[in-house]
Each structure stands twice: as C-alpha cells, then as structure tokens.
Amino acid sequence: MKLVYFAWVRERIGKAEEEIELPGEVTTVRDLAAWLAGRGEGYAYAFENPAVVRAALDRKHVKPDAPVAGAHEVAFFPPMTGG
C-alpha cells in the first residue's frame, strides 16, 4: 500500500511517501494512524493528535473508521481551509 503525507504531516515524518506492507490487525484508517504512530519519533509526533489529521483513500476523503482493505493509496494531511 502506498502512503502519502502532506504539509506538516510530511515534515514531521520526514518523507513525502512510502510503500508499506499492511499488518493484518490494521483494518481502518484509525488503526493505520495508531500503527504508524508506533513506528518512531517522527510518526509519533505526526499522529500525536489523530483527531486533527485527515485522510483520503484512493483520493476520496474518508472518516477514521473507514476500512483500508482494497485501497491502493492512503493520504494523510492536516485540516484544510478554503477561500
């Protein structure tokens, strides 16, 4: 699965994207964020407040309880403002 990081999420993790093998226990976006937070200091910092990190599965915005099975890409980004 491809993970893509934007804005301060990318800056805290230190990379724009990566390919991962999804562990079996990770079934939702929320699970994925929690699993990533345990991968190291930068990830923990990026996901320290998961309620403010938004996600998209295959370029479609989703809620934290969205299942990740079958997705090719998960993007994480901070809240956006429009104008």
Image (cartoon, rainbow, N blue to C red):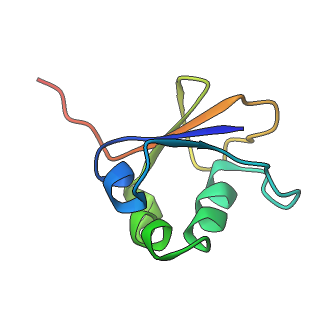
Extreme left residue here?
83
**Image quadrant containing the C terminus:** top left
Instruction: Write down the quadrant of residue 71 in the picture.
Output: top right
Q: Is residue 8 above or below residue 74?
A: below
73 displayed left or right of 78? right
78 displayed left or right of 64? left
| Residue at horizontal 74 percent and vertical 42 percent from the top | 67
Pick whichever, 33 or 81, lies toward us. Answer: 33
Instruction: Write down the quadrant of residue 52 in the picture.
Output: bottom left
| Residue at horizontal 54 percent and vertical 74 percent from the top | 40
- How many numbered dots are placed on residues in this image? 0
Residue 23 in the image, given as x and y percentages of width and height? 83, 57
Pick whichever, 64 or 38, lies toward us. Answer: 38
Pick whichever, 19 or 25, lies toward us. Answer: 19
Residue 44 in the image, given as x and y percentages of width and height? 48, 73
Q: Is residue 30 above or below residue 72?
A: below
Pick whichever, 58 or 18, lies toward us. Answer: 18
| Residue at horizontal 61 percent and vertical 66 percent from the top | 34
**Image quadrant containing the N terminus:** top right
Residue 39 in the image, given as x and y percentages of width and height? 61, 70
Residue 41 in the image, given as x and y percentages of width and height? 46, 76
Q: Is residue 9 above or below residue 41?
A: above
17 displayed left or right of 67? left
